[in-house]
């Protein structure tokens, strides 16, 4: 089976630079994949991507050595299993708030006897190889998002979930959970920033991969220096809109509007 290079990078202490795909287009996914990302995540939660779109995007990513990941829109076993069957090599699951939810997520990614994933990797066999079923449990990356008030209260029990590979922080929802305005790149004087460092410390103690979404490359570098193993920078639609705004501002001399604080 094709190895998941992200697991090896984590083992080697190499930071993983992750791209984010919200546009439902195989071509834009292919363009992003050729820019040097270590992995690219198809956002099926806040993007406008459905399953047929995701298939084409995964095929486009497969033209490169970029590792394909997906964020599902909920902790729903059928959706998790289906995107894995499509050849996705890692799942980011949103709104994991307690041990039971973490276990349900992880077990949906694993074949019996470790989990209850149903067998039928229709494209996983093409991307991963003919021995996919034998090794998939060891290669698929399973990241739970820590972003709710309950998750912050039950952090230790979530991180102690067997076979969980790591966590991923969505700073916007995390900010809402602690009563602050949503957004990325949290200032150091915010409660959200302090919680981010607490989550990171807890993950590092357990040798779990820690990922976080960032608005800028500079902040992503800061998070790497703090100890994060995976950093996402922006997204395809934000790069497109941001680049266009800069060009229009230069030509027309207009001030660009503040970018949205969401994905």
Image (cartoon, rainbow, N blue to C red):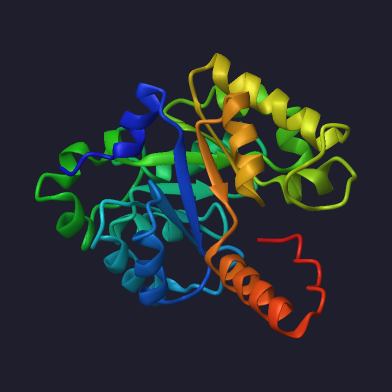
Above or below, comparing residue 166 to residue 32 in the picture? above
Horizontal relation, residue 111 to residue 189: left or right:
left
| x then y, percent, for residue 113 | 29, 33
Q: Nearer the viewer, residue 192 or 51?
A: 192
Residue sticking out furthest to the bottom = 252
Residue sticking out furthest to the left = 130
Above or below, comparing residue 262 to residue 26 in the picture? above
> In percent of the image, x 57 and y 66: which residue is there?
239
Q: Which of 230 and 256 is in front in this view?
A: 256
> In percent of the image, x 57 and y 31: which residue is there?
224
Q: Nearer the viewer, residue 231 or 164?
A: 231
In the figure, residue 88 lies in which quadrant?
A: bottom left
Above or below, comparing residue 111 to residue 194 in the picture? below
Horizontal relation, residue 134 to residue 198: left or right:
left
Horizontal relation, residue 120 to residue 156: left or right:
left
Question: Is residue 96 shown to the viewer in this render?
Answer: no
In the figure, residue 156 lies in which quadrant?
A: top right
| x then y, percent, for residue 193 | 78, 34
Above or below, comparing residue 256 to residue 3 in the picture? below
| x then y, percent, for residue 214 | 64, 47
Residue sticking out furthest to the top = 205
Where the C terminus falls, by quadrant? Answer: bottom right
> In percent of the image, x 72 and y 45: which residue is there?
171
| x then y, percent, for residue 242 | 64, 69
Question: Is residue 223 shown to the viewer in this render?
Answer: yes
Where the N terminus falls, by quadrant? Answer: top left
Q: How many marks?
A: 0
> In percent of the image, x 80 and y 37: which residue is there?
192
């Amino acid at each position: 089976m094709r190895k998941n290079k992200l697991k090896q990078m984590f083992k080697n202490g190499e930071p993983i630079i992750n791209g984010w795909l919200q546009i439902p287009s195989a071509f834009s996914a292919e363009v992003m994949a050729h820019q040097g990302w270590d992995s690219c995540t198809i956002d099926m939660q806040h993007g406008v991507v459905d399953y047929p779109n995701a298939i084409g995007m995964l095929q486009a990513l497969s033209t490169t050595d970029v590792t394909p990941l997906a964020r599902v829109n909920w902790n729903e076993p059928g959706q998790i299993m289906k995107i894995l069957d499509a050849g996705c090599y890692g799942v980011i699951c949103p709104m994991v708030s307690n041990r039971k939810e973490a276990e349900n997520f992880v077990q949906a990614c694993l074949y019996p006897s470790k989990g209850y994933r149903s067998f039928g990797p229709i494209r996983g066999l093409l991307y991963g190889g003919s021995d996919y079923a034998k090794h998939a449990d060891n290669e698929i990356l399973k990241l739970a998002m820590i972003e709710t008030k309950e998750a912050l209260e039950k952090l230790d029990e979530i991180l102690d979930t067997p076979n969980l590979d790591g966590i991923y922080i969505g700073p916007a929802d995390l900010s809402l959970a602690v009563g602050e305005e949503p957004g990325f790149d949290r200032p150091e004087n915010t409660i959200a920033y302090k919680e981010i460092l607490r989550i990171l410390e807890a993950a590092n103690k357990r040798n779990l991969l820690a990922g976080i979404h960032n608005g800028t490359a500079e902040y992503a570098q800061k998070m790497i220096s703090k100890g994060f193993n995976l950093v996402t920078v922006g997204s395809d639609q934000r790069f497109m809109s941001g680049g266009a705004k800069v060009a229009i501002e230069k030509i027309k001399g207009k001030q660009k509007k503040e970018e949205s604080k969401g994905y």
